Amino acid sequence: MSQEALLFDLGILEYQKAYALQKKLVEMVADQKFPQTLLLLEHPPVYTMGKSGSEENLLKEIQVRKVDRGGDITYHGPGQLVGYPILYLKNRKVSHYIRQLEESLILLLKEYCVDSFIREGYPGVWVGKEKIASLGVRIKKDVTYHGFALNVTVDLEAFQCIRACGLDVTMTSMQKVLKRKISIQKVKRDYVQCFEKCFRLKLEQKGADLLKVMKG
């Protein structure tokens, strides 16, 4: 039987605001004062570097926000679907959680007839020799935050400023692979079903402002 969780579509939200929301949610979920939650959103253009990141992976002089997730450097921008699951992970391995996230994205891409796969030892999702989705997570008090970034229609030129994920890899997108326009809103809706299936959760979408819901 599926557990219930909440879903919030936050639209386009500045990175720091989304990060602050995650931190609050982690504490509340850990204290059992708020349900498990999935945040889906896009960010305005921003480069972020995880705890294992290296400035050697900057190919140009750009501003980078250092954060407490795993992984190296990546780019977020409009046209990229970002997912932040705030889930209670007690008694489940982090490696298993990451694999579930990867599988949910592979399942989504399969719905669009995109053949994708996992490369052992390299978190994320790949299409051929190119990377289409990146992962970086953090666990605090047995609760997950940060998550994944799936390139849907994002400007791939932005990745030219960095060695994405610390690798000599070319990033791709759903739009590039399929060679047609893609609706990110439709991708969001389709992803919800894939997430529910992989995590055995039933998501209830909330249209109200997240901060109001948290206070209520």
Image: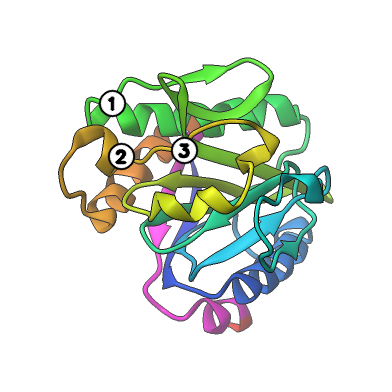
Assign a secondary structure to mark 3. Answer: loop
The residue beneath circle 1 is 114
Type of the residue with mark 2: Met
Q: Residue at x 56, y 40 (%)?
A: 134
The residue beneath circle 3 is 171
Q: Residue at x 62, y 76 (%)?
A: 17
Is 158 placed left or right of 140 in the picture?
A: left
The residue beneath circle 2 is 174
Which residue is more in the foreground, 25 or 66?
66
Residue 20 rendering spot, x and y as whole percentages: 69, 73
State the residue lying farthest toward the left. 180
Is 138 placed left or right of 208 in the picture?
A: right
**Residues at badges 1 and 2 in contact (C-beta under 8 Å)?**
yes
Residue 44 rendering spot, x and y as whole percentages: 48, 71
Query: Could you say which disc has been placed on residue 160 in the image?
Result: none
Q: Please give the range of residues in magenta.
A: 199-214
Type of the residue with mark 1: Val
The numbered mark, 3 or 1, whose residue comes first in the sequence reads 1
